[in-house]
């Protein structure tokens, strides 16, 4: 596949690995819009956030090519994959960077840990229209078909009305039947955090080790304008995510603090 | 060291590893304020962002203990280290989470990739007063003594005037002589991105691999209210960083986009 001048060129990645069902569903829908270059890892890269690989070399292998897509395997993080594709593998800057469909929601503060959303943020840093999609279902055999309708609606909107520089979308789809989903809701990121509980175990040599577990705690369950509320109430949540982490509203007060 | 009720309990970490000079300088200054629990890795964890270790177990080892501090080695990312310390190693929630002093600046969009800032953000998610410090000098033998004065000023301010929930500080110190530094400047995160250039090489088997390199491009070199401007002009930059990545200013417009 070599993209023609008029083809939309779409870069697709995820953090659940090349064999994830969510990735395959997103590939199918993206091929309706243009030519797709897919790059991902053999194994899952969940929870890698915006991590970069700086201590080991990156490898890439072209696995599959046909008229609609090229598929590459890479050993890096989702962010590495986007960087490598944009700088080394693509004929030109892609029109879109799409990531997902993640197995499990990336609402609230999960946006900070998510490899899927990091890939979208990375695309956004290049000035490319970028979206991360997630389904609120961790199961590897989850039914992703319910997502297709909403992915189409959102990408059609973005095709004619691009996002401002430095903003990408975080889309979370409820784990519900098609007829239960009430529509799309534009939201803000809910306040919350993960309450970590570690499982403390002993290895066969008697040495202690820990597994990270934990559960999410929503700090504002009653607010009806958050992504957590939308998901709980069977709406598709769409949060505009900015790469600017400055607490702008606090700049003046902080200046006062430092004057006194 | 067991913290008394009236002791300030300070959790200290970094992403350059236990033997980094910047970490030792920050330990020295923090011991002036309270009892310190230091946790870090044997090797560098640069560029790990907010990554979590989910596929391998975490290990922790108490390396050193005296009246002023305890030092732990951990095999996880900076974010893992904060989670593990808060949940498993500390007697109570720390009063402060401090990270650094990073070898190299974490201004502009580097906040998204930085393991040091991720540790501060993680502390912030727990509702703890959190600050990441960086010196604009990548050298392992950089002179960190210039940082001490500004770390003291900033932490003294925070001791009496805490930050609002969900906000931590990103402090970058210029690589300049003490008498050249003009003071502290409250700033916003500069717009910019990394222009990646990969070094493409052949291994002894003739196979291609890539090393990530690249350089930072400041998109607004003329703006005088950014962290990049402050550093270039020999000010210590202090950016209030929010864990809320919502582009609030764009919510209304996005809603309009989806109505039409």
Image (tube, coloured by chain):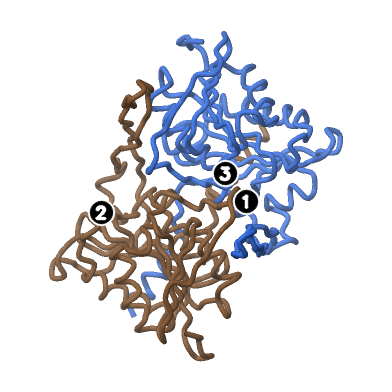
Chain colours: A blue, B brown
The residue tagged with tag 2: helix, strand or loop?
loop
Q: Nearer the viewer, mark 2 or mark 1?
A: 2
Residue B234 appears at what percent x and percent y? 20, 61
For the residues marked 3 and 1, what is the alpha-carbon distance in whole angstroms? 8 Å
The answer to whether residue B46 is left or right of residue B220 is: right
Q: Is residue B138 left or right of residue B238?
A: left
Q: Which mark is residue A188?
A: 1
| B81 lies above or below B49 | below
Q: Which residue is drawn at the image coordinates 68% and 41% (left, top)?
A: A172
Mark 3 and mark 2: span between their CA atoms?
34 Å
Residue identifier under label 2: B138
Whether residue A112 is situated above or below residue B253 in the rendered picture: below
B67 sits left or right of A109 in the view: left
The quadrant of the picture occupied by the C terminus of chain B is top right
Check the image and name the residue furthest to the front.
A205
Q: Quadrant of residue A23?
A: top right
Give the residue pinned by disc 3. A240
Give residue B88's quadrant in the image.
Answer: bottom right
* For the residues bearing labels 3 and 2, Cβ distance under 8 angstroms: no
For label 1, the crowd category at 10 Å Cα-Cα, with few meaning under 14, some 14 to 19 and many 20 or more, is many
Q: Residue at x 69, y 26 (%)?
A: A25
């Amino acid at each position: 596949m070599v993209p023609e001048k008029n083809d939309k060129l779409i870069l697709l990645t995820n953090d659940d690995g090349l064999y994830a069902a969510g990735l395959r569903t997103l590939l199918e829908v993206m091929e309706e819009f243009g030519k797709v270059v897919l790059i991902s890892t053999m194994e899952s890269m969940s929870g890698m956030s915006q991590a970069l690989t700086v201590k080991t070399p990156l490898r890439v292998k072209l696995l599959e090519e046909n008229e609609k897509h090229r598929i590459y395997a890479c050993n890096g993080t989702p962010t590495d994959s986007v960087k490598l594709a944009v700088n080394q593998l693509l004929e030109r800057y892609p029109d879109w960077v799409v990531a997902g469909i993640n197995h499990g929601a990336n609402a609230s503060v999960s946006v900070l840990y998510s490899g899927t959303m990091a890939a979208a943020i990375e695309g956004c840093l290049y000035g490319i229209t970028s979206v991360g999609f997630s389904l609120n279902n961790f199961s590897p055999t989850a039914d992703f078909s319910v997502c297709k309708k909403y992915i189409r609606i959102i990408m059609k909107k973005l095709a004619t009305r691009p996002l401002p520089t430095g903003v990408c979308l975080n889309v979370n789809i409820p784990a519900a039947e098609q007829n239960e989903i009430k529509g799309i809701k534009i939201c803000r990121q809910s306040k919350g955090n993960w309450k970590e509980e570690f499982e403390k175990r002993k290895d066969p040599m008697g040495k202690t080790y820990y597994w990270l577990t934990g559960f999410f705690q929503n700090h504002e369950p009653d607010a009806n304008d958050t992504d957590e509320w939308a998901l709980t109430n069977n709406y598709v949540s769409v949060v505009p995510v900015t790469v600017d982490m400055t607490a702008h509203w606090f700049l003046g007060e902080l200046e006062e603090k430092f004057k006194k």
